Image (cartoon, rainbow, N blue to C red):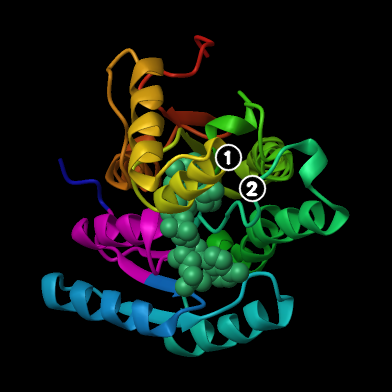
């Protein structure tokens, strides 16, 4: 099926590796021009080279630190000069920079999580808005997490930032719908990709077990929770981003889509 993304331009935040990289590759495969960004410019250039060698699309690579508003300002000056148009924004940046339970986290951990995982979405959305308003196929897709609506026992700061993203995405859909801009959220469960190694290391430390043992435990736990007996990958998320960015999803906005192998307990 042609998703009609050919010639559209997508900005994917945090696309040097993990889920963001998979999304950039998937959208480029569908014919979209891609704007990729992150702090590690060498990784972005390697991805740019790969995309250009495989697909006939335009790629713009930009070094940015999403926790610093001035860095985002500078990036957008360069995007305006080089590309000058955006139809699709995928807010993917987010991380558990420090793992812990409620009592392990200090004020700075909460503030840093909010700044990286929530405020990056706000900042990129505001900067992209003038272009989205002009696009005939404008869409924002926020990469959230299953823990935003089904929290576990750890990483309360990250859960709070993702829950804020989920709620504000709904408000954005209400606000921006009349301008023709759709806003949707994807909530992945733990994937065997992206931040996987950091999840495994945290579990190994917490349970005082080896990396290999922790990897086995997390994978088995994730599979046991899923009716499909599977653990997901970044490509599962990327495929849904392409569908949501496409006009075939033109009547879908303000929704949260789980990529979780059926782990979510509610039927909504
Ligand atoms: N992996 C999972 O299991 C999972 C599950 C649910 C939700 N998620 C969410 O999915 C998103 C992507 O996760 P991932 O696992 O793919 O993470 P990842 O592999 O750690 O990739 C994160 C990306 O964000 C960029 N980034 C991080 N901090 C940044 C900053 N301050 N400024 C600019 N770029 C920054 C990184 O690039 P640089 O290092 O080059 O800056 C990288 O490209 C996150 O929002 C995460 O919360 C992931």
Where disc 1 sits, the SS reads helix
In the image, what residue occupies the spot 68% across and 65% down?
123
Residue 137 horizontal side relative to residue 156, left or right: left
10 Å crowding of disc 2: few (<14), some (14-19), many (20+): some
Write the start and end of the magenta stretch as one range. Answer: 5-34
Q: Which residue is mark 1?
A: 206
**In what element is the residue under mark 2?**
loop
Q: Which mark is residue 226?
A: none
Residue 137: tell me if it is visible.
no
Rendered residue at 28%/25% (across/down): 230
User: Dots 2 and 1: beta carbons under 8 Å?
Assistant: yes
Q: Which quadrant would residue 69 be assigned to in this image? A: bottom right
Residue at mark 2: 99
**Rounded to the nearest whole Å, what is the CA distance between mark 2 and mark 1?**
10 Å
Would you say 262 lies left or right of 150 here? Answer: left
- Is the N terminus in the top left, top right, bottom left or bottom right quadrant? top left
């Amino acid at each position: 099926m042609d998703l009609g993304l050919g010639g559209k331009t997508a900005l994917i935040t945090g696309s040097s590796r993990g889920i963001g990289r998979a999304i950039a590759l998937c959208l480029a495969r569908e014919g979209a021009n891609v704007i990729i960004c992150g702090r590690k410019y060498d990784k972005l250039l390697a991805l740019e080279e790969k995309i250009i060698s495989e697909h006939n699309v335009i790629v713009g690579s930009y070094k940015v630190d999403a926790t610093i508003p001035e860095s985002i300002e500078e990036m957008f000056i360069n995007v305006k000069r080089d590309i000058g148009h955006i139809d699709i924004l995928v807010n993917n940046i987010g991380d558990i920079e420090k793992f812990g339970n409620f009592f392990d986290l200090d004020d700075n951990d909460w503030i840093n999580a909010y700044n990286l995982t929530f405020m990056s979405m706000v900042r990129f959305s505001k900067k992209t808005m003038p272009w989205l308003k002009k696009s005939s196929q404008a869409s924002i897709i926020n990469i959230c997490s299953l823990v935003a609506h089904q929290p576990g026992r750890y990483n309360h700061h990250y859960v709070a930032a993702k829950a804020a993203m989920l709620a504000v995405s709904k408000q954005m859909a209400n606000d921006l719908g009349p301008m023709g801009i759709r806003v949707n959220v994807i909530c992945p469960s733990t994937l065997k990709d992206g931040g996987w190694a950091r999840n495994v290391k945290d579990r190994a430390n917490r349970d005082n077990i080896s990396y290999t043992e922790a990897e086995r435990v997390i994978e088995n736990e994730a599979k046991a929770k899923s009716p499909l007996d599977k653990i997901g990958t970044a490509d599962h998320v990327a495929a849904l981003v392409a569908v949501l960015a496409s006009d075939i999803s033109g009547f879908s906005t303000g929704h949260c889509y789980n990529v979780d192998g059926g782990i979510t307990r509610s039927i909504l």
